[in-house]
Image (cartoon, helix red, strand yellow):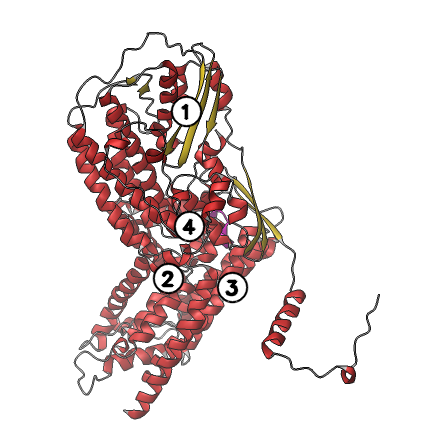
Amino acid sequence: MSRVLPQPGELPEVEVDPSALRHLADAQMNVELDTGDMVLNIGPQHPATHGTLRLVVRLDGERVVAADPVIGYMHRGYEKLTEFRTYPQITTLINRIDWLSSFANEVPFISAAEHLMGIEAPPRAQYIRTALTELSRIATFLLFLGEMGLQVGAITPAFYGFRDREYVLNLIEAVTGGRFHPNFNRIGGLKDDLPWGWISDCRGTMDKVLESCDEFEDLVAGNPIFQQRTRSIGIIPPELGAAYGVSGSNLRSSGVDWDLRRDAPPYLVYNELDWKVWTHPDGDSFARYWVRLQETRESARMVLQMLDQMPAGPVMAKVPRIIKVPEGEVFVNTENPLGEMGYYVVSKGATGPFRVKIRSASFSNVSILPWVLRGVYIPDVITILASLYFILGDIDR
Amino acid sequence: MSHLLALDVGWGTTLAIKTLIVLAIVPLTALILGYVFLLKMMSHMQSRLGPMDPGGFHGWYQLLGDGIKFMQKEDIMPAEADVRVFALAPAIVVLSTFLVFAVIPAGPRLVVQPLDVGVFYALAVSSLSVIGVLMAGWASANKYALIGALRAAAQLIAYELPLVLAVVGVVIQAGTMNLQGIVNFQQHGELFGWGGIGFPLILTQFIGFALFMVAAQAELTQPPFDMPVAESELVAGYMVEYTGFRFLFFFIGEFGTAFAFAALAATLFLGGWATPWVHGTAADWLGPLVLFTKVMFVAFLMFWARFTYPRFREDQLQALAWKWLIPIALVNILLTGALKVAF
């Protein structure tokens, strides 16, 4: 099919805006230089994906046309495994879901079982649980604060992050005996009381954490290049984020004032503490960094308060030797470092649950990736991934 | 030493000696920078010690171990690779480093080849490495390598301009492109009629120096301009498929070039080997030491930035070059020219 082009003489005389002509020339140029899209596999073995997340990215030059996260490379079938274990055994499993803040993982599951059994842990145990949960939050976020710098290209903050996190992990280790997988919660309380001298050690470390937060604020958040790389990159609108099930700091960075520690039915001792929920209106990568930085500080302050208010008393309630959970169903969700973590436990009265559904934060947080990665540059893919902060174990369970 | 330098040997022997010296110096400088900055300074900045146990002062044997390790590694060639281009690429990258060293003077008489167009030559051959980088990226048959190579090409071309323009001010002031001539100008120059410390050109060309350092950092693809090798995105960019000895070549090229650029900056702006009040034979002896000290100082600045800053995105990096560095460099040239005519 051939089109008859008008001859030069036949063209009608019209006023043409010169800028439109320039756009026309650009458009023509783009058609001439048009190249096919390139499909790039980021991961499953890639330094930026914190493990085995695979992103199939379709690229037009450096620009992402479409991104498709492929998950499941680390699926361990924990929901099924829980059906064959007793309640005390399950804590070792769920330790390994979000391995950076294992202690925080244990809490919702244990409290679900306690709800069903009608047991309540003694106040001191509640306080220690809360303190350790906040300590694991600090450890997780300190790693993030450094790691984010690394993903944006600065090597040094990552080492500071690891160094300061180690101080906090030492505290957790001193109480529970494990740096990563404490397995310390028992139905009805805790395995042990705090060791001697721990409270004063913890005070010193929290001061250090507050100092290092200032350092991160100067070194990373205050850096003009860092701001250039993260501001208005990867914006998640609040409604969309909520619709995708994004939770935790990621949603608070979009300006949604929602924190389960405050808004869920009261759990642990959060309502006895004086603290604040931080939000940021922007919803970009920088906001996510900033909110986590503030939350690290807030958590350190909360721990300091808890150390002052810590009640005396036993750390274990009276529980039967063999734990059998009465028939029933319960859903307990808590505010974990990565977002909302929930366990739906169905019990048929046996020593182990009939079915456990795990609602992990990273799974929903990552589900927004195809939307948020569309149209960004490759370097931004990495900063957005880093700022969403997910743990592969938390996605794949 | 002076009589040795004045030794009358045939041109063939001289050439052989000079070539040997350059061949020995490039890996040596790369090792020195690698040890002092990459292993030690970086470690201490990151509140760790770096390798301490391998032996020697602060574990410097680690370098030998690393070198031997690279030689032992299997030389893997990707199945899809363009074999000859793949093999040649690291050699070209290192070659450009070798060539720069040929014109950098280390003393009044210690220079491999005092070219009259020394500045021009040094900057020209230093940009040869981009060909090697492109070859490496293309021949690797790897998408990451290709993206890295294209980024490198775009970046090296963009920053070549501010690099050259930053030096023009120096050339205008010294009135020569010969590096030896520029050093002599700084040694014997007078500062408003006072020749006490000579005339290090950084005093007037501080803008040029800053521009040169920024552009050199980009030419070296070091952070904050390390988009081409961006570890968190492209794994290792154009080097991703290289192993063993070929990778070592890239490593030597990277650090050797860092040393070469630091030496150029020291020569052009800080007076090179020149020390005030030291002339003649003493300068022959002192020259290399003084130059080395200045080079280490400049390299310290480079690596300091490297270990501190996050990296720019490609478009921001281009914007920095075209919208800021080049206009500033042009203004600097204009000002220098006007002042040269005025005074």
Q: Is residue A155 left or right of residue A370?
A: left
Q: Is residue B239 magenta?
A: yes
Identify the residue position indicated by label 3 in the image.
B153
Q: CA distance from mark 2 to mark 1?
A: 49 Å
Residue that protrudes farthest toward the right in the picture? A1
Query: Crowdedness of circle 2 by 10 Å Cα count: few (<14), some, many (20+)?
Result: many
The chain to which mark 3 is attached is B
Residues in magenta?
B236-246
Residue B258 circle label: 2
State if disc 1 and disc 2 touch (CB < 8 Å).
Answer: no
Identify the residue position indicated by label 4 in the image.
A283
Where disc 4 sits, the SS reads loop
State which tag comes first along the sequence, 4 or 1: 1
Residue B189 occupies which quadrant of the picture? bottom left
Mark whose residue sits in front, 3 or 1: 1
Mark whose residue sits in front, 2 or 1: 1
Residue that protrudes farthest toward the top in the picture? A321
